[in-house]
Amino acid sequence: MGVVDLLLHGLAFVLPAFCVALCTTLVGRLGRSGGMRWWSEWLLTGAAGSLALLGALWAMGRDGSIAGYAALVACCGTLSWLLSLRRR
């Protein structure tokens, strides 16, 4: 596996985390202002979601399991909710 293939595999692994993080960040900001900038909240939530996917990969031994994606959504949603409490 070359460097380009490794980079593409890594990006494909974290892409669902950053897509879910973008959705939860934008929906969480509806009707509210202040707090962190949206892109920093998105990066923080995306990194936490990537760690959730990495933990699911380590625990189950394979990528793409429904439980792993459920952990991703729970992690991103919970972190976005906690950050919205901080904005008030």
Image (cartoon, rainbow, N blue to C red):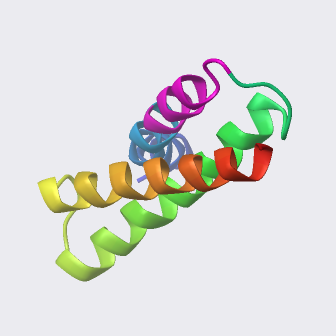
Point out residue 83 in the picture as x, y percentages from the top left corner.
68, 50
Q: Nearer the viewer, residue 25 or 47?
A: 25
Check residue 65 for magenta coloring. Answer: no
Image point 59% across, 32% down: which residue? Answer: 25
Q: Nearer the viewer, residue 14 or 43?
A: 43
10 to the left or right of 82: left
Point out residue 6 in the picture as x, y percentages from the top left corner.
48, 50
Image point 38% across, 61% down: which residue? Answer: 53
Quadrant that contains the C terminus: top right
Point out residue 80 in the picture as x, y percentages from the top left corner.
57, 46
Image point 64% across, 26% down: which residue? Answer: 29
Q: Please tell me how many numbered marks the rendered image carries.
A: 0
**Helix, strand or loop for the magenta stretch, by majority:** helix
32 to the left or right of 67: right
Q: Nearer the viewer, residue 77 or 54?
A: 77
Q: Residue furthest top?
A: 31
Image point 84% across, 40% down: which residue? Answer: 36
Q: Residue furthest bottom?
A: 59
31 to the left or right of 68: right
Q: Is residue 75 above or below residue 87?
A: below
Point out residue 50 in the picture as x, y percentages from the top left corner.
49, 56
Q: Which residues are magenta?
A: 20-31
Q: Residue furthest left?
A: 66
